[in-house]
Every structure is written in C-alpha cells, then in structure tokens.
Image: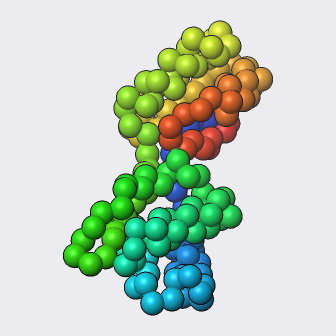
Amino acid sequence: MADSSFDIVSKVEWQEVDNAINQTSREIATRFDFKNVGAEISRSGEKIEMKASGEERVKAILDVLQSKFVKRGLSLKALDAGDPQLSGKEYKIFANVKEGITTDDAKKVAKIIRDEGPKGVKAQVQGDELRVTSKSRDDLQAVQALLKGKDLDFAIQFVNYR
C-alpha cells in the first residue's frame, strides 16, 4: 500500500483579508467615536496601514480589524501589527499579513513531529510548506491533532490530504 500524506502550509485567503478591511472601513465611517478623528484603513500588498489623529483611536481601529479577522475565519497569527507611531499630526499603525512557513519554523514543526509524533511519520521541508508522510492514516491524523494542540507562533492549515 502506498504512503498517505498531507501538506502543512501557512496561507491567507486574500479575499477574506480585503473583506475584513472593507468591513472595518465601513464600521469606522459609521461609529460615533470615530467621527472627526481622521480614521482610515488601507492595504497595499501585504501591508495594512491604519491612521487616526489619536493613539487610542488608531489602537481602536486595530481592535476592530482584529475582530473582523476573527469573524471572517482568519487567524490573528497571520496579522503582525506594530506599535503606534507618530507621523506629523497623526498616529499610524502598520501591520503585515504573514504568509508561508519560514525554513526555521518548518524545522521546528518537523522536530515536534519527530520527537512527539507517532513512529514511522516522516516530515520534509518543500519550499514554504512541509510534507508529512506515513503508511498509516491514523498516524497522520494523530500528527494533525498534535500540531493543533501546540501553540505555534504562525497559522497553519492542512491541505492535500491523500
């Protein structure tokens, strides 16, 4: 019988990110506490920029964005927000959307699988993803349960389960 496998990836659904940003923008436009503070949010590439006239207001924009991320099923681990910075008369927060597993993170996950996972499960790094193979599908499901239980500092998804 052939080996079963799945891939561990860290991907972001960009349409959902855009939807979360649009919903945040609409909420900023309608909420009373954001009136006359110059609050706005925009995205270019993987960067999200939030602006407001006060530090507390720009933090509130980030809070609204995070709540929209959760509602849309996006992981907050994919959102890497910085601290508020004063730029002229307004405060700005820049946030990056992280996608892909770095080589170091992939090695950490492979080590967790090797040390704590079932015997006979192999993990190999393939670019920005990790392929996990085993003869037993039950072992693969045990690896998935193991990784879901770990508090990794990046979002993971399991794809190509064969």
Can I make out residue 116 in this image?
A: yes
Looking at the picture, tell me which residue is in the foreground, 28 or 56.
56
Numbered circles on residues, count: 0
Residue plotted at (68% across, 25% down): 146
Residue plotted at (46% across, 68% down): 56
Query: In the visual, does 142 lie left or right of 89?
Result: right
Asked if 17 appears above or below 114 in the picture, the reply is below
Q: Residue furthest left?
A: 88
Residue 94: name its quadrant: bottom left
**Which quadrant of the rendered structure holds the N terminus?**
top right
Q: Residue furthest right?
A: 138
Query: Looking at the picture, how far across and down is residue 145, in whole percent?
Result: 72, 29
Residue plotted at (62% across, 41% down): 158
**Which quadrant of the rendered structure holds the C terminus?**
top right
Residue plotted at (56% across, 52% down): 76
Asked if 79 appears above or below 143 in the picture, the reply is below
Query: In the visual, does 84 lie left or right of 20?
Result: left
Query: Looking at the picture, how far across and down is residue 71, in whole percent?
Result: 68, 64
